[in-house]
Structure formats: C-alpha cells, structure tokens
Amino acid sequence: MEPESDDPIPISDSQQRPPPSDPIDDGSSSAKHDQPLLGTPTPPLPVAAAVIKELEKKSAAYVRHDLYGPMGRGPLPWIEKLFLAIAFLTIVPVRVILALTLLVLYYLICRVCTLFSAPNREDGQEHYGYMGGWRRGVIVRSGRFLSRAMLFVLGFYWIKETKHSPDPGRQLNSECNDLSEESGRPGAIISNHISYLDILYHMSSSFPSFVAKRSVGKLPLVGLISKCLGCVYVQRESKSPDFRGVSGVVNERVREAHRNKLAPMMMLFPEGTTTNGDFLLPFKTGAFLATAPVLPLILRYPYRRFSPAWDSISGVRHVIFLLCQFVNYLEVRQLPVYHPSQQEKDNPKLYADNVRRLMAREGNLILSDIGLAEKRIYHAALNGLFCQQ
C-alpha cells in the first residue's frame, strides 16, 4: 500500500463550485428518492463501453478502482478466484457466525435495558436516546465495545486515529472567542460518507444518533438497536410536511446536544450519499441550520485488493468480498471543533461550504460538484452494460 501524500490535491474551478444545497436535507441521504440504486426492476438498456468511459469521467467520485472493477464484477485473475474460494470456505463462515453473535448479544442487552421503560416520542417517532441512569450507561458502553468488536471481526484489527490541532487563525476569526461552556461542545459530528461501515466506526467512537429510513426502525434486531441510538427516522420518498418535521427534529437535536452534555450528538453525512473515498460532494445545509458548532471527521479506507467503499457495487457482493479480505484498513482524522462565525450563522450555505473546504484540504480530498442524480445515471449505465454481457 502506497503512503498517502500530505500535499493537497489540485482542485479545478469546476470541481470547487458546489450546487445549491437543500436547506431541509436530513444529512444522511436523499430524502426525495427511495428507489434503490442497484438491482432496480427497470429493464436494462444496452450501453456501449465507450459511453461508460465517458460517464466515469463525469462521475469520478463513484468509480471503483480496486482489483474487482465496476460493480465488483470485473475480470479476476485465477489466483484471485482461488483466494476467494478458499476464504469463502474458511474465514467467511467464522466471521458470519461471530458477527451474528455480536448482533444478537447487543439486541438482547438493548431489550433488557428497555424493559418497562417508555420510549421518548418526538414528532410521532419513538426512541430511547434520552434514557438516563444505569440503563443508558449499559447501552452506550456495551454498544461502543461491541461495535468495535464487530469491526475487528470484519478485519479492521487496527484503526489509525489522528487529531489535528486547532488553527489559531481560524479561532481568532471565530465567534467563539469567549470560550463559554455553552459554545464549547459540538452539536453534531460531520463526516464524509464512504460505506455502511462508517456507522459502525462512529458507534464505537462516540455512539451518536443517526438519520435513517423509517423502515430501519422496523427491522428485526437492528430496529431496536436504532431506537436505542436515538435515530431520527425519515420517509425518504415522502414530499409531505413529515419531511420538514424531521428536519426540525434534527435541528432541535443538534441544538440540544450543543447545550446539554448528556444529550447524544447527531451524526450527519451532509454529502447525502457514499463516494469512493477520494472525493467530497457538495454538503446539504440541513446539518448546519442549527448554527451550532460541529466536529468534522474524515474517514479513509486504504486498500490493496478490495475497496470497502460502497459506491457502485451491490450489497451482497460487497459483504462477501469484504468478509473474504483478511485485513481491512481504516484511517480517521478528527479536526478541531468548528465554531461558525456570525456570517456563517446568518448563511448556513456558507457555513456548510466552509466546513466542506476545510475537510477537503485537511483530508486531501477532491471537491466535486456532482450529486445523487449523476450516481443514478452511472449505476443505470453499469447495470445496462453488465446485463448485456
């Protein structure tokens, strides 16, 4: 694995210009689309390889560059196929059993801790995010430990974490010079989004609340765990006032976490979708409407053979290839808490854009102005190409 360069990647003007952001985006994914990105029932269309190459230039943030190729369906050398066969018959069953054991164990812990306890209700949603006393302590501590154990089972034996010192110039230009207790705690964690594995890391690190699809709360095992995390549920295809209500809940949660150190912080992915890890998409402004300080985190998944990024590959293939890879790598860079200036408080779009540029510079990421629409077009083209082969 080649070491990452510390020099910033040159960014073109066209890459730096973010499009207008949705002021009520939930910070996790597109709230206007519930159609899956892969495996849609739409009949595939024949797509020439030359067209795919052209789309890859426009949708560079979603292109896989690992050994397994686009959608994880590229041609593999026989030695790699042999390796996959051996791993599938040996380490994959062990990892599946251990992962399911950890999942069931944490579900049982959550079930016991929530017995005879009424959930919090916000805007028609139920969760246990504000549960206090020993119950909350057990849920949080066991959740963090078991999430890290799950990552270990998946091959993330070591996680490299680094913290950057505050920028004195940025602090002088901030409105937080009083350093009062009220302004010291961030209300939300802001992270780039590469894979569903991001959630496991954040659970093991800070155990925050997430924004999730409403259907997640109804899933076996995972549903109760998401309620113990204090997740905010959103109906992604809904265009009713319910979506705006969810945005209000998120903003209030962010403000409460900023004011109350006992309240769980919100974990938000303002890009709205996953990338291959080399790019940073435009930020939605929903995470910044509360005008509270945020904690930026940058995730990277270095790889040699299979990339853990969940960009243009089906869930089943991703899980299988990930389990077959004996060692996986994760690097985390925690930036100083970002306190918005008065100008940024008055202009959430400016606030979001400044945090995004800071993360791109510190994380050596390329700013891209594409979004979920381009991702859907690229995925549809890949599906059409592979279906014709």
Image (spheres, grey):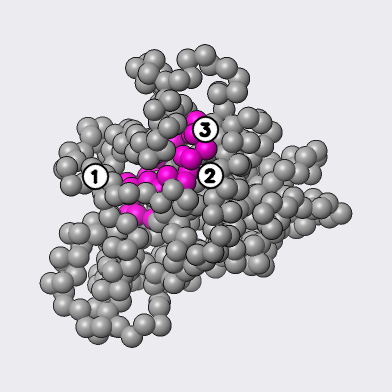
Q: Residues within 10 Å of mark 3 (few under 14, many from 20)?
A: many
Q: For the residues labelled 3 and 1, say whether their Cβ atoms are less than 8 Å apart.
A: no
Q: Amino acid at mark 1?
A: Arg
Q: Type of residue at label 3?
A: Ala
Left or right of 285, for residue 282: left
Which circle marks residue 17 in the picture? 1
From the viewer's perspective, tell me whether residue 266 is left or right of residue 75.
Answer: right
Is residue 326 on the magenta stretch? no
Q: Which residues are magenta?
A: 274-301
In the picture, measured across the screen, residue 318 lies left or right of residue 112, that is left
Circle 2 residue: 267
Q: Residue at the spot x=69%, y=51% of the render?
A: 122
**Residue 292, numbered circle:** 3
- Of all residues, the one furthest to the left in this rendering is 50
* Residue 267 position within the rendered picture, expressed as x and y whole percent measured from the top left: 53, 44
| Mark earlier in primary sequence (3, 1) | 1
Is 71 above or below relative to 290?
A: below
| Residue under the point 21% across and 46% down | 15
Q: Secondary structure at mark 3?
A: loop
Residue that appears at 28% across and 46% down: 18
x then y, percent, for residue 50: 12, 72
Distance between the Cα atoms at labels 3 and 1? 25 Å
Front-most of 74 and 304? 74
